[in-house]
Image (spheres, grey):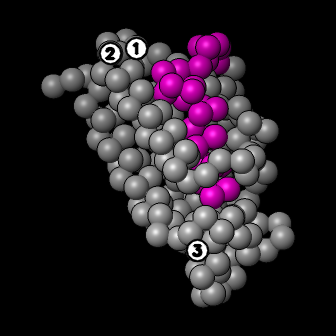
Amino acid sequence: MHPAAHLFARLDAVEALREDLLDAVRPLDADLLRVRPEPTSWSLVEILEHLVRAEETVLGPEGTGVEGAARAGPGSRILYGVVWAILRLGIPVQVPAAEMRPRGEVGLADLTEEWRARHLGLRRYLKGLDPGGLRRPVFAHPVIGSLRPREALVLGEIHLRRHQGQLHRTRAAVLGGGAAT
């Protein structure tokens, strides 16, 4: 058994969730994807772009880590718990880094391709890690600092689940089924 087998199972869950999000919006035309139900809310494509940009920020453009990620601050384990709780409990917060904000310049097809390519790169990267590499911080979160592969995948899955509800509420509002919150 590969030393990262447990990570591949988590990555499979993240990818299934990603596909659920994409399946929810794929049938909609490009104009509906860009509708903001409220002036301050994000459109469907902006929600997806945020998810893609957040992963890019933490995992690196190719899913193979972020240079300098090994520099962990003394409070990074505490910050990990705080961010985990914020995401898990759905506590509203500002996007922690400008590079995670949607720019509104990318279409669904390009976002989908970029997202899938990053996950393929991540999968290849994880396959190449030895047990020591699996315990080494190689990813970087703008608030927490360094993350080990398991921590990055756990937060990634929780982050997707947090925005899954937002995406489905926004979709319902865009299609005339209620307000997005």
- Per the image, label 3 sits on a secondary structure element best described as helix
- Residue at horizontal 37 percent and vertical 12 percent from the top: 132
Q: Percent from the top left, x then y, of residue 79?
A: 67, 36
> Disc 1 vs disc 2: Cβ atoms closer than 8 Å?
yes
On the image, the x and y values in percent for residue 48 come to 59, 54
Q: Position of residue 17 (x, y in %)?
A: 41, 55
Residue 90 visible in the shown view? yes
Point 65% across, 68% down: residue: 31
| Residue 174 magenta-highlighted | no
Mark 2, residue position: 128
Other-residue count near label 3 (Cα within 10 Å), few / some / many at <14 / 14–19 / ≥20: many
Q: Pointer 2: residues within 10 angstroms few (<14), some, or many (20+)? A: some
| Horizontal side of residue 36 vs 136, given as left or right | right
How many numbered marks, from 0 up?
3
Q: Residue at 53% across / 21% down in the picture?
A: 65
Q: Element under label 1? A: helix
Residue hosting label 1: 133
Q: Tag 3: residue type?
A: Arg
| Left or right of residue 124, residue 82 in this image | right
Residue at the (63%, 58%) spot, across then down: 45
Looking at the rendered image, the disc whose residue lies closer to the viewer, 3 or 1, is 3
Q: Earlier in the sequence, mark 3 or mark 1?
A: 1
- Distance between mark 1 and mark 2 Cα atoms: 9 Å
For label 3, the residue is 171
Res. 6 image quadrant: top left
On the image, the x and y values in percent for residue 144 come to: 67, 32
In this picture, which residue range is highlighted in magenta? 45-72
Q: CA distance from mark 3 to mark 1?
A: 40 Å
Callout 2: helix, strand or loop? loop
Q: Does the image show residue 17? A: no
First in residue order: circle 1 vs circle 2: 2
- Above-or-below relation of 126 to 18: above
